[in-house]
Amino acid sequence: MFATINEDVFRSYVFWSSILVLKMLVMSVLTGMQRFRKKAFVNPEDIATMPKLKLKTDDPDVERVRRAHLNDLENILPFFVIGFFYMLTNPDAFIASTIFRAVAVARIAHTLVYAVVVIPQPARAIAWMVPYVASIYMATKTILHFW
Amino acid sequence: MFATINEDVFRSYVFWSSILVLKMLVMSVLTGMQRFRKKAFVNPEDIATMPKLKLKTDDPDVERVRRAHLNDLENILPFFVIGFFYMLTNPDAFIASTIFRAVAVARIAHTLVYAVVVIPQPARAIAWMVPYVASIYMATKTILHFW
Amino acid sequence: MFATINEDVFRSYVFWSSILVLKMLVMSVLTGMQRFRKKAFVNPEDIATMPKLKLKTDDPDVERVRRAHLNDLENILPFFVIGFFYMLTNPDAFIASTIFRAVAVARIAHTLVYAVVVIPQPARAIAWMVPYVASIYMATKTILHFW
């Protein structure tokens, strides 16, 4: 069943998905940087050596990065799954590779305009929409193929 | 190692998993609908063109959909992984296909009774329990097989 | 393309990943236990039969388990993906198996020191760092391989 996967498409999928894994992991560093910068820690054991500090669970800059990270979980993780299934539907190699690249580039842009330098809307809406529509398309195509 | 996967079981896995990917993606639309209906936005840039609005992070209807979505991440995403591994343990084809279908139907029901029309308990508890027990079963079977 | 995966490495990947799926599923039980112990429920329908109770969304013990669970989603789910890709780069069998085992053991330790018995830092920082660095390593190796 995996024999039908085009080699070039598969390499594109693995490459761009790995880029997105790396991008997601960077979110933890961004969160940590904001926590230290704003001194916004949420666990008592994290400030045990800094008795003057109080816990802070609602810092807007920290929460912004957290929302961007959660949005990654909601969108990138399903993409890993549906991107893999989509390759089993014997898609056009150029279209499939282009989708994978577009999803990766858009999700990187999403992080940049949401959690690094805030850009006015509709920047984030567009960066979110591209992978979203792509995932809907791949899911629909897969469902129809495996009906 | 993948050669042992039964073709019918695999098709069932891909089909129902794709249905669940689509179902998860719908959560973003549900969240957006509640945000616009209740005017509950959490980012300053999202209300830049609506100066009368204030940020609102604790709307109960929005938070309900968010909890349903997070519950999807906690339960459906691990299912994608353990469902795939489980197929490598040479399971009975009927049992495996039935599990995949039951998980998908139950998770759709979970969303309906949690985030669309609130149904009294134990509706949500049951809808949550079926995929949960199924995942524990598949994980246990896989661990014993690959010991 | 999957033919290059070493059988022993693959078995190690499936085994330890299944252990981690099981570990993640246990988080729901831990959350439920804290909710009942602290009577901290967040949905009106969950306390419909207990009229004296009020909703409670900010119990520190419940939120601690929730944070540990979310940290699992952020770190273990990407590991499932990047661990699979990494096996396609023809890694040394001993190194790969050791990484998978180390990730699993460290993530179990992370849950224990974060959400079961709180241990002073840097216990949680170290338990978090091992899988994090391992995932960065596997992602980098995969990206360079599929460039």
Image (cartoon, coloured by chain):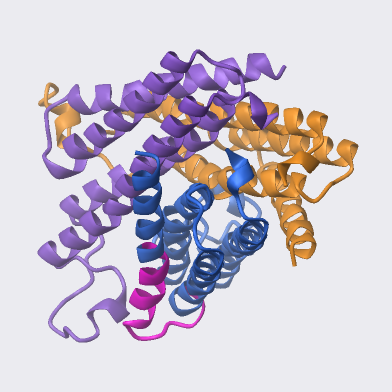
Chain colours: A orange, B blue, C purple
What type of secondary structure mainly makes up the magenta span? helix
Is residue A98 found left or right of B10 in the rendered image? right
Pinpoint residue C14: horizontal percent, then vertical percent: 45, 38
Is residue A40 found left or right of A127 in the rendered image? left
Specify the segment rendered in magenta.
Answer: B115-132
Residue nearest the viewer, comparing C23 with B146: B146
Pinpoint residue C5: horizontal percent, then vertical percent: 58, 26
Q: Is residue A71 magenta?
A: no
Give the residue displayed 54% in from the left and 61% down from the top.
Answer: B53
Pinpoint residue B85: horizontal percent, then vertical percent: 49, 47
Residue B102 visible in the displayed image: yes
Give the residue displayed 69% in from the left and 34% down from the top.
Answer: A104
Give the residue displayed 46% in from the left and 24% down from the top.
Answer: C135
Pinpoint residue C88: horizontal percent, then vertical percent: 61, 24
Quarter of the image where the N terminus of chain B is located: top right
Quarter of the image where the C terminus of chain B is located: top left
Query: Vertically, is B48 above or below B69?
Result: above
Residue C58 visible in the displayed image: no
Is residue A43 found left or right of B35 in the rendered image? left
Q: Is residue B128 magenta?
A: yes
Residue nearest the viewer, comparing B66 with B35: B66
Image quarter for residue A92? Answer: top right
